Amino acid sequence: MEYSLIDLIKKGFTKITADEREYYLTHYISTEEKQIGKPIFEMTKEEELEYDRLCFNNKAGNLKGYDCPICKNKGEIMVVKDGIAYYPDCSCMKIRRSLANMENSGLGNLLNIYTFDKYKCTYDWQKHAYERAKAFITSDSNFFTMAGQSGTGKTMLCTAVAGALLKQGIELKYMLWLDESIKIKQVVNDNKQYGSMIEELKNIPALYIDDFLKTEKGGAPTSADIRLANEIINYRYNKCRADKSQRHITIISTEWLLPQLNEFDNALAGRIYELSKPDFFIQITGAEKNYRLKDF
Ligand SMILES: [Zn+2]
C-alpha cells in the first residue's frame, strides 16, 4: 500500500493509522526529524523549535564570495534561547563585509594576485621582508610598515598580509591614501560626514593604508594631510597602548623613508616606528632600487 504525502497531510497526522505512520517514517521523514528522533507530528513544542532550528541552519543560502560551513552562506543562523528563536548574524558576515570592502576599494582581485606563494624571494632583502610579513600575521604586534620606493613589492606583501588577516576573520579596511584622503579632506567642514568617514578608519580592527602620505603631485604632504594622518594614527596608537588584550592592526605601505617621515612630523613618524619596530618596520633602500627590472 502506498500513501502520498499530500493525502497524509490532508487527512491530518492526528488521525493517521499505524500503517500510514510507518509509511511516513520510511518514505517521508527528513534528516532533521531523524536528528530529533521522531516525526514532526509527534514533537513537543521544544522539539519543534529545535526542528525549526535544524531546518533553518541546514538550508543553503546564496551569498557569494566566501563559503561558510556554519550558515551555509545565508549570513544568519537561528539560535534558541529560553524557548525563543533569534537570528543573529553569522560570524562570516564580518569576513564578507571585509571582502566587500576590499572589493569596493578595487583591491578585490589583487587579493588573488598578491599572495605569499607568488612572492619571489631571490634576494636576501626579499627573503627578509617575506619572513617578517609572514611572522606578523600570527604575532601579537599591531603595526606593520613597509617603506621604500615603488617596485619594492610593498603592495604585494602588505596585500598578502591583509588577505591572511581576512582569512582569520579579522575585519579589515583598505585605504588607498591618496584617493581616500582627498575625499575626507573635502568634507572636513561637514562634521557629520567627516565624522563617519574618519570613525571607521579609527576603529576598524585592522586598517591597511596603501601609499601612506602619497600626494597628487608627488611632493611632500600638506599640513592638512599630516593632520589627517595624525588623527588616524594617533587614535590607533593610543588604542594599542590602552588595550593590550587584543590587536589593533595597522598595515602601512609608503614610499617615504623614515628620515622623510621624521621631517614631515617627528611625533607621527615616532609612533609608527615605535609600534612597528624592530621586527615589523621594513625599509628597503639603496642597491635594491632597480629590482623592478628583475621581473618581479
Ligand atoms: Zn556564515
Image (cartoon, rainbow, N blue to C red):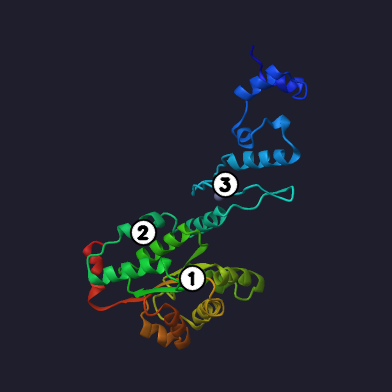
**Distance from Cα at disc 2 to Cα at disc 3:** 29 Å
* Disc 2 to disc 3: CB gap under 8 Å: no
* Disc 1 to disc 3: CB gap under 8 Å: no
Give, as a three-letter code, the residue at label 1: Ile
Give, as a three-letter code, the residue at label 3: Cys
- Residue at the spot of label 2: 114
**Distance from Cα at disc 1 to Cα at disc 3:** 27 Å
User: Which residue is nearer to you in this view: 241 or 163?
Assistant: 241
Q: Is mark 3 within 8 Å of ligand 1?
A: yes
Query: Of discs 2 and 3, which sits in the foreground?
Result: 3
Query: Of discs 2 and 1, which sits in the foreground?
Result: 1
The residue positioned 59% from the left and 49% from the top of the image is 75
Crowd band around label 2 with a 10 angstrom C-alpha radius: few (<14), some (14–19), many (20+): many
Q: Is residue 167 positioned above or below 48 on the image? A: below
Residue 19 place in picture, x, y as percent: 68, 17
Q: Is mark 1 within 8 Å of ligand 1?
A: no
Judged left or right of residue 168, residue 280 is: left
- Residue at the spot of label 1: 249
User: Which residue is nearer to you in this view: 188 or 168?
Assistant: 168
Q: Secondary structure at mark 3?
A: loop
Figure label count = 3
Disc 2 or 1, which lies upstream in sequence?
2
Dividing the image into 4 quarters, which one contains the N terminus? top right
**Distance from Cα at disc 2 to Cα at disc 1:** 19 Å
Residue 216 place in picture, x, y as percent: 43, 73
- Residue at the spot of label 3: 71
The label on residue 58 is: none
Judged left or right of residue 271, residue 260 is: left
The residue positioned 35% from the left and 63% from the top of the image is 156
Disc 1 or 3, which lies upstream in sequence?
3
Q: Secondary structure at mark 2?
A: loop
Residue 279 place in picture, x, y as percent: 36, 76
